[in-house]
Image (cartoon, coloured by chain):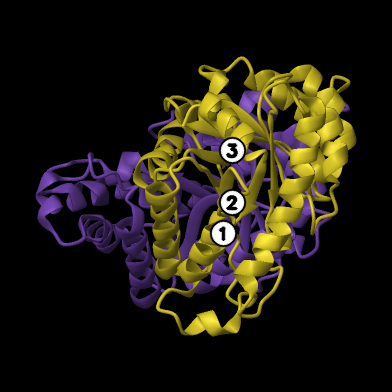
Chain colours: A yellow, B purple
Amino acid sequence: MTTQQLVTEIHTKKSFLCIGLDVDLDKIPPHLLKEEDPIFAFNKAIIDATHHLCVAYKPNTAFYEAYGIKGWMSLQKTIKYLNNNYPEIFTIADAKRGDIGNTSSMYAKAFFNDLAFDSVTVAPYMGKDSIEPFLAFKNKHTILLALTSNEGAFDFQTKKINQKEVYKTVLETSKTWKNSENLMYVVGGTKAEYLKEIRKIVPNSFLLVPGIGAQGGDLEDVCKYGLTDNVGLLINSSRGIIYASNDKDFAKASLDKATEIQTQMSTILNKVS
Amino acid sequence: MTTQQLVTEIHTKKSFLCIGLDVDLDKIPPHLLKEEDPIFAFNKAIIDATHHLCVAYKPNTAFYEAYGIKGWMSLQKTIKYLNNNYPEIFTIADAKRGDIGNTSSMYAKAFFNDLAFDSVTVAPYMGKDSIEPFLAFKNKHTILLALTSNEGAFDFQTKKINQKEVYKTVLETSKTWKNSENLMYVVGGTKAEYLKEIRKIVPNSFLLVPGIGAQGGDLEDVCKYGLTDNVGLLINSSRGIIYASNDKDFAKASLDKATEIQTQMSTILNKVS
């Protein structure tokens, strides 16, 4: 998917919501556990209920790997279901991968070709040659961790290299990489006040913003500093939407929660357009 | 496995060799492609030929994920084969994972419980709460990226935070984390000269050292600065051993190559003991 297609979809739906499919068998409605593939059954119900309210889905690979082969089969079924039924949806493999060049190529192949995701999240620690193999894929997007939503972000990311925070150094350096136009960035929604500075470095890039909802980030604050002419934001909510209920009404509850967020987003988009 | 068991095994075999099982179907002997599971067939042959010469095997997960479900099945079969037949071998999932706390817990569960690896490599960018969930597992080892073997290591890892390189900051900070005694570190063999400084910060920790062989690192140099009283080194070779031949004699060729390295290691261990 091209960035322009994503932007068009955002305007059509008046939404820049991404729903995180972080499926934990201990948290889904118990009646689903008797399904042949409870994880996929859960995802399918959530997707069918909410697809018109969001522009992206983001399964975090950890939640699938934790269930071994079965988990990977659920992930594969989920991405196939999305690509076959809702091709207008932007798909994100939240995998946070990164390795030396020939190895990163294998990861890129896994997520872009084999699983056919539109994008994958990657970690910057190993530098340029660990990321460029992902950037080489046309119309695929590589979402680089910049400033994450967790407390541990303060351990290294906000420390200063020559008077400049590590995450800013990451942002600036990444712009020099080959095919850097295929980059997006992860910026935690719990750190909205940093967005002003971040937008000076990457004024037009799309930012994937987790941390709204369960982690405490605020949508209005993020939009205040993060919105661009092309919207430029994908706001993720996982637990707040998918676990809105763990009863038989779970899909309806996720619909309600997603509607609430999409309504807020629609108001924000109307204000700025 | 405890660290002491690993050290005992090193002295018994007079080897601190780790063999990287980075299986690429384009590189393995073509006659194996007609096997039902070519990746496992390849790994099994390499393991059977070399297990008495090394103390660890390290499959890099990228090479398995690139083949989708089939790849994960090959990985699962490989680790089961190792655990059932060679329980004295230290196993490393080279996965370079790391995510917010509840997500890292899922990764830890995937690699330590479901796949039953002894250790997993992790990336430090997201800080303390992304690593501590791994450290919570008893007799499991978390191998943190410190200074990697690739060129991209110079993009961020060797940059200075308050006069101290990022990788040194990572090493020092990680020592303050809960259960940090379960930490080992990745230090690239192409950067042997850095080991002197690294040993000042982590004098006794085990270091996993990739980059010997195909990537150009030198064994003698690494040992000169990296060896501890407890050896403290696992030297990895992947391509140099497993792709020593891509003909029907590939297992024998890997044996020869592993023997060559183990002989060097034995000489080094005899010198210092």
Q: Which is in the foreground here, disc 1 or disc 2?
A: 1
* Same chain shared by disc 1 and disc 2: no
Residue B247 coordinates in the image, percent (x, y): 12, 43
Find disc 2 in the rendering and name its residue. Answer: B97
Residue B42 coordinates in the image, percent (x, y): 23, 55
Find disc 1 in the rendering and name its residue. Answer: A62
For the residues labelled 1 and 2, say whether their Cβ atoms are less than 8 Å apart. yes
Height in image: B199 above or below A241?
above
Q: Which is in the foreground here, disc 2 or disc 3?
A: 2
Find disc 3 in the rendering and name its residue. Answer: B224
Task: Find the distance from the CA under tag 2 to the CA under tag 3.
Answer: 30 Å
Q: Quadrant of the N terminus of chain B?
A: bottom right
Q: Secondary structure at mark 1?
A: helix
Q: Residues within 10 Å of mark 1 (few under 14, many from 20)?
A: many
Numbered circle sitting on residue B62: none
Instruction: Name which residue type carries label 3.
Output: Lys
Task: Find the distance from the CA under tag 1 to the CA under tag 3.
Answer: 39 Å
Q: Residues within 10 Å of mark 2 (few under 14, many from 20)?
A: many
Along the line of sight, which residue is nearer the eye, A211 or A97? A211
Task: Find the distance from the CA under tag 1 to the CA under tag 2.
Answer: 9 Å
Query: N-terminal of the two: label 2 or label 3?
Result: 2
Q: Residue at x 44, y 55 (%)?
A: B15
Q: Residues within 10 Å of mark 3 (few under 14, many from 20)?
A: some
Q: Residue at x 48, y 63 (%)?
A: A44
Height in image: A164 above or below B53?
above
Instruction: Name which residue type carries label 2.
Output: Arg
Judging from the image, mark 3 belongs to the subunit labelled: B
Residue A161 coordinates in the image, percent (x, y): 82, 24
Along the line of sight, which residue is nearer the eye, B32 or A269? A269
Q: Residue at x 42, y 28 (%)?
A: A137
* Same chain shared by disc 2 and disc 3: yes
Judging from the image, mark 2 belongs to the subunit labelled: B
